[in-house]
Image (tube, rainbow, N blue to C red):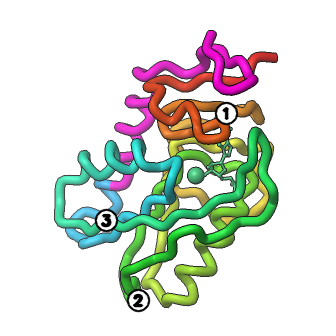
Amino acid sequence: MIQLHDLEFTPFISEEEILHSISKISEEINREYEGKILVFLGILNGAFLVASEIIKRFPADCEVNFVKLGSYEGTSTTGNVSTLLGLTQNLKGREVVIIEDIVDTGNTLAAIDKILMDMEVSGYKIATLFLKPHAYKKSYPIDFVGMEIPNDFIVGYGLDYNGLGRNLTQVYKLKE
Ligand code: IMP
Ligand code: MG
């Protein structure tokens, strides 16, 4: 068990399972984009670890960029997604793979969809390490999913509770 701020968390997903999921996502992306120069777009802060692992495994030329979006306060979503650091690269006509740590309600994806549509990208696909299918309220197809999880609040491997927990190499869930 670990404590972050006022809350206690118990081990939930091992580092081995996480890396196995990332390898699976990578194999799918690498197969899909063979011979194409794509742009990986990581969503900060949470996706920094999973982005580095996926990008390390990509064998061909690619570009890497990040945007910083935020919607969570404490252990729940505010429903409002704000752009904290915007896109600095023109992606018009490009093939993009979005890398997320976790897809929950899908509000963040809706915000990214708008940014990429306004930029007239050629197309994009979504990769996420974790998906909460019972919380997901949008209809964007999620192309590469590492693992589906229940609606628990989790921390570790990039995911935080009020700023803490991102450096944990395995994933913990809120103690009931
Ligand atoms: P969405 O916009 O509701 O899909 O939420 C996406 C973002 O909320 C993720 O990129 C995370 O930053 C954050 N988030 C969602 N669920 C969790 C969780 O269980 N723990 C920590 N952060 C989460
Ligand atoms: Mg995130």
Q: CA distance from mark 2 to mark 1?
A: 34 Å
| Residue tagged 1 | 149
Q: CA distance from mark 3 to mark 2?
A: 15 Å
Amino acid type indicated by mark 3: Val
Name the residue nearer the viewer: 158 or 18. 158
Instruction: Report which quarter residue 31 is drawn in.
Output: bottom left
Residue 12, magenta (yes or no)? yes
- Residue 116: x percent and y percent? 53, 80
Give the residue at x 37% y 81%.
89
In this rendering, is residue 139 above or below 76? below
- Residue 150: x percent and y percent? 73, 32
Name the residue nearer the viewer: 142 or 91. 91
Q: Of the residues under marks 3 and 2, which one precedes in the sequence?
A: 3
In the rendered view, does 88 fall on the left or right side of 175?
Answer: left
Residue placed furthest toward the left: 60
Give the residue at x 48% y 67%.
67
Name the residue nearer the viewer: 134 or 153. 153
Element class at badge 2: loop
Q: Give the magenta range.
A: 1-29
Give the residue at x 65% y 18%.
3
In this rendering, is residue 52 above or below 113? above
Query: Could you say which disc has been placed on residue 64 in the image?
Result: 3
- Residue 142: x percent and y percent? 59, 57
